Image: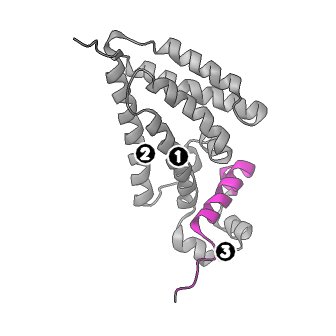
Amino acid sequence: MPQPVKHSTDVMLDAVRALVLSGGPAAASARAVCLATGASSGSVYHRFPRRDDLVAAAWLRAQDRFLRGYLDALAPADAQAGVRAAVAVLTWCRTDPEDAALLLRHALRDLLRGDTSPALAQQAQTHHRALGDALTTVAHATGHRLTDVVLALVDLPYAVARRAMRDHGTPGDEDIAAVRRAVTLLLPATPDSSPCPSS
């Protein structure tokens, strides 16, 4: 009968996240993860052969969790998709503040010293492509420029979330209401995005 895993991958990645948030990218070494979790060095290196794999896996896990809700909010790509998605950024920061802090404080490239394993590099590309495709679909469906969609659905809610988390921990109801109003102004309903009248 196989022995149960004493130190799960999630436990290790939780430790990486905590180390990065408390001490910066340099704090997230394999040795530090071993000390934080009690896992053996062999257990850590078996799953993450290099230090960059550790931090990339933690960051990509957070991004994957975020994208599940964000991409759901963008579908269907109707006139309200922008508001749903922008608000989803702030509500996710409330429900998963540690992962949100990791994504908002650090770009993946800033955490890395070299290359990651091919599987993690592919995961990063897949996330990037999925996000880009979803935003492009919204732009086409609503008749807005892609640059305007990115401003309203990425740059704006990210900036509000960063400020809110810096100032008072997580975004408040007023932050969410402000983002909702701003996105409505930036991406007003257009004739192309309105339901077609019945004949």
Q: Which color scheme did the rendering employ for the protein?
A: one colour
Q: Residue at x 41, y 20 (%)?
A: 79
**Mark 2 falls on what kind of element?**
helix
Q: Which residue is mark 1?
A: 63
- How far apart in space, not on screen, are marks 2 and 1 (Cα)? 8 Å
Does dot 1 land on a helix, a strand or a loop? helix
Q: Earlier in the sequence, mark 2 or mark 3?
A: 3
Which residue is farthest left? 199
* In this rendering, position of residue 138 left or right of residue 73: left
Q: Which residue is mark 2?
A: 127
Q: The residue under label 1 is which amino acid type? A: Gln
Q: Quadrant of the C terminus?
A: top left
The residue sitting at 58% across, 62% down in the picture is 51
Label 3 residue SS: loop
Residue 120 visible somewhere in the drawing:
yes
Tag 3 residue: 39
Mark 3 vs mark 1: in front: 1
Picture residue at 50% right of the left edge, 48% below the top: 64
Q: Is label 2 in contact with label 3 (beta carbons under 8 Å)?
A: no
Mark 3 and 1 residues: CB-CB less than 8 Å, in contact? no
Above or below, 36 relative to 199: below
Identify the magenta region: 2-27
Judged from this view, the residue extending furthest toward the front is 199
The correct choice, above or below, for 164 with respect to 114 in the image is: above
